[in-house]
Image (cartoon, rainbow, N blue to C red):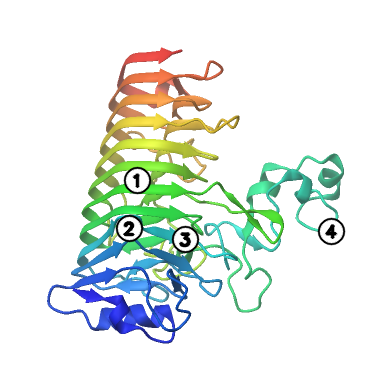
Amino acid sequence: MTNVNDYIRNTDSESFEAALAALDGDRVLVIPPRESSIEHDRKFWLIDRAILLPENVSVILQNCTLKLSDKCRDNFFRSANCGLGIRDPEPFQNIHIRGEGSCTLLGADHPRAVGDGGKILANPCPYEDLDLCRPDIAPWVSEDRKLSGVPSWSDKHDHSYGTDAGKEGESQYGDWRGIGILLANVRNFSISNLRIVESHCWGISLESCTYGSVEKIEFDACMSKMIDGMRQNMENEDGIDVRNGCHHITISDIVGHTGDDMVALTAIAPDDGLVGGSLCSTHVMGHDWTRRESGIHDIIIRNINGYSQLCFNVRLLACNTKIYNIAIDGIIDVPNGSTVHRGTIRIGERDGVYGANLPNCISRVTISNVISYAQDAIIVRGHFSDSVISNVINNNRGGEAFSFGQEDTLNNVSTNNIINV
């Protein structure tokens, strides 16, 4: 085993890089609480750039905290086969990240960028309506809406906090660098027993990853944060996103609070020619679907117990491609005071929102044992076929246990034991 404390350098990022370069035959990197004569009172690790993981490596975190510094516009961990300017991540295998005891990944005090590739950076970026409508800030809000005190949806969600806002030479949009843990084209992987707090975008993202697991993860994010005396907007704080090309993955025992979707299967396959390693996107891999699989299949999602500030506990979204062979079981939507979020599970999307809603785009799905306190329990908005929904309890009397957009979008879907309390 290689212990990071045995390779202390001038910065913690340099210490991690030195330890990775010194990996011995067992290829195990141990990260305990920090011990160093430099800032010796600081026991947490302060990261300036992503820890790049080679293949055939196991990372064991032991009762430690890793925090992103205010200099960092990068991931906590990223598979070393992908990144800026890498068009085609080579196949990797055997990457494992495991926490022992209490292990936390913590966002920066002043993040350089928060949000996905569709969010424009702003500093300040008010979250509260009262601050958005102040005359001296948030210039994207029209004078009429400022006077009314009622900003629009776009006013509230098109911008996201980042100290890189307005800085020459820096991207003014979020991208994959804000993701906490990013793996691409990795076969045989695992991520377990971690707490991810105030991530700068999604907590975990998997692209074209296969035969792996993500389990025992706690999220703590609410789409906003008090920074410099103002509650700032922090967009797209999803928990786990499974992207195009992923299959044979188990996601289990996920708890906590996310700003956006807790667990999302997002097979969005645009024909936009995105090149791998580009910025302004949460995809680190390219969009040449003749060279890589676009769909998602053979995924198990179970024991999800938590709350999404804005969206859904579980979301399945397939545009221009397909999602199939999915088992979802044991989803408990935990109420969060007086706030009621949009739904517990959402299946599909209307045609044209993210791309084409193809017939049979989401099929062979089982959903069972769902307890919901959201606006609606299960919402179907796209084509959904050859599937079973059972044992659903909706505790919100103003909502529906099962709702769908149009009859012709459902094909051979069986429902039983669906209850409105």
Going from N to C along the chain, the mark reached first, 1 or 3, is 3
Mark 1: few/some/many CA within 10 Å (<14, 14-19, 20+): many
297 vs 182: above or below: above
Q: Residue at x 29, y 46 (%)?
A: 296
**Is mark 2 in CB contact (under 8 Å) with mark 1?**
yes
Q: Residue at x 53, y 20 (%)?
A: 399
Residue 142 in the image: state x and y as whole percent.
81, 50
- Residue 26 found in image quarter: bottom left
Q: What distance separates the C-alpha of mark 3 from that of mark 4?
A: 31 Å
Q: Residue 106 carries which label?
A: 3
Give SS at disc 2: loop
* For discs 4 and 2, the disc positioned in front in the rendered view: 4
* For discs 1 and 3, the disc positioned in front in the rendered view: 3
Residue 11 in the image: state x and y as whole percent.
44, 82
Looking at the rendering, in which quadrant would you find the N terminus? bottom left
**Is mark 4 in CB contact (under 8 Å) with mark 2?**
no
**Is mark 1 in CB contact (under 8 Å) with mark 3?**
no
- Residue 18 found in image quarter: bottom left
